[in-house]
Amino acid sequence: MPPVTPVSIGSVRCGLPENPLLIIAGPCVLQTRELTMTIAERCQQITAQLGLSFVFKASFDKANRTSAGAFRGLGMEAGLRMLEEVKTQLGVPVTSDIHLPEQASPVAEVCDLLQIPAFLARQTDLLLAAAATGKPVNVKKGQFMAPSDMQYVLGKLKSAQATGVLLCERGTFFGYGRLVNDMQALPLMRSWGAPIVFDATHSVQQPGGLGGSTGGNRRMVWPLARAAVAAGVDSVFLETHPQPDQSPSDGANMVPLANVEQLLSQLGQLAELTKPWF
């Protein structure tokens, strides 16, 4: 693969051959302080032990839930306070997703990386607002988009002088209620000079699979994540929870917190093995 432009996320760097595999991990949505700190502390411990980089991720508002009555989160003000506590107490970079251009500036005051949801990957005003904050931006490829379409997303962010851009693969619609991953997308998107993130947990979603909510198959996280690392991605994104089936959002595709160490150990070993190839 050609060299990429490295991205700095707080104290973490991503994209250079000497950079460790970056893990972006946390719960799908913020719930309680105790739960948030439990997940963040354990993920920090595991990644430090394995020599991997770490950015904590959690959403303050799930604005794209399937049903109107589904839990959306704590809201921006309370959510940002919680993310700031994680960042201050643990000394780790944090990220969250934004859904409206006016959210970009206040979220950037706390978060080291701004995430653009897949359903909003083509929204020009949102992309430009994120770039204008001076923080790096992680854009998830829309499930409805060809990988080649992401070069135009990258172009929009570059036109606004974004300080850094990561592109994230999270699956493509394959009929109703099913996603598949085209691994050819990974080297293609990386050839444009952006570090590539593989979203291992949303890739195994089954949209609308539970009727009024999203299903998933968490058993497939392991083989897909290993395949992505073998293909040369710079980062793996995953969501985790001590009891995924009790999570108010995306529980069916989340990795149980007790299994994260095993998964990341495999990915770290694979990243070291394959690093000379890229």
Image (spheres, grey):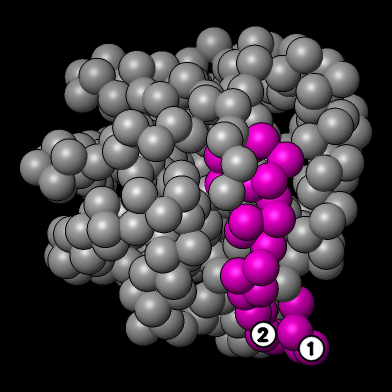
Q: Residue at x 82, y 44 (%)?
A: 151
Label 1: how many Cα within 10 Å (few below 14, some 14–19, many 20+): few
- Say what secondary structure mark 1 lies in: loop
Whether 271 is among the magenta residues is no
Q: Position of residue 225 (x, y in %)?
A: 41, 67
Q: Is residue 130 left or right of residue 245?
A: right
Q: Is residue 242 visible?
A: no
Q: Position of residue 129 (x, y in %)?
A: 79, 20
Question: Amino acid type of disc 2?
Answer: Arg
Q: Is residue 23 left or right of residue 8?
A: left
In contact (CB < 8 Å): disc 1 and disc 2? yes
Rendered position, 226 above or below 142: below
Rendered position, 61 above or below 214: above
Depth check, front residue: 26 or 151: 151
Quarter where residue 115 is shown: top right
Q: Residue at x 34, y 75 (%)?
A: 222
Q: Residue at x 66, y 35 (%)?
A: 193
Q: Is residue 240 visible?
A: yes
Q: Position of residue 11 (x, y in %)?
A: 34, 17
Question: Amino acid type of disc 1?
Answer: Gly
How far apart marks 1 and 2 lie (CA) works out to: 6 Å
Depth check, front residue: 38 or 227: 227
Q: Is residue 17 left or right of residue 160?
A: left
Disc 1: which residue: 175
Q: Position of residue 43 (x, y in %)?
A: 22, 45
Q: Residue at x 60, y 70 (%)?
A: 183
Label 2: how many Cα within 10 Å (few below 14, some 14–19, many 20+): some
Disc 2: which residue: 178
The magenta stretch spans which residues? Answer: 173-196
Whether 178 is among the magenta residues is yes
Q: Is residue 165 left or right of residue 94?
A: right
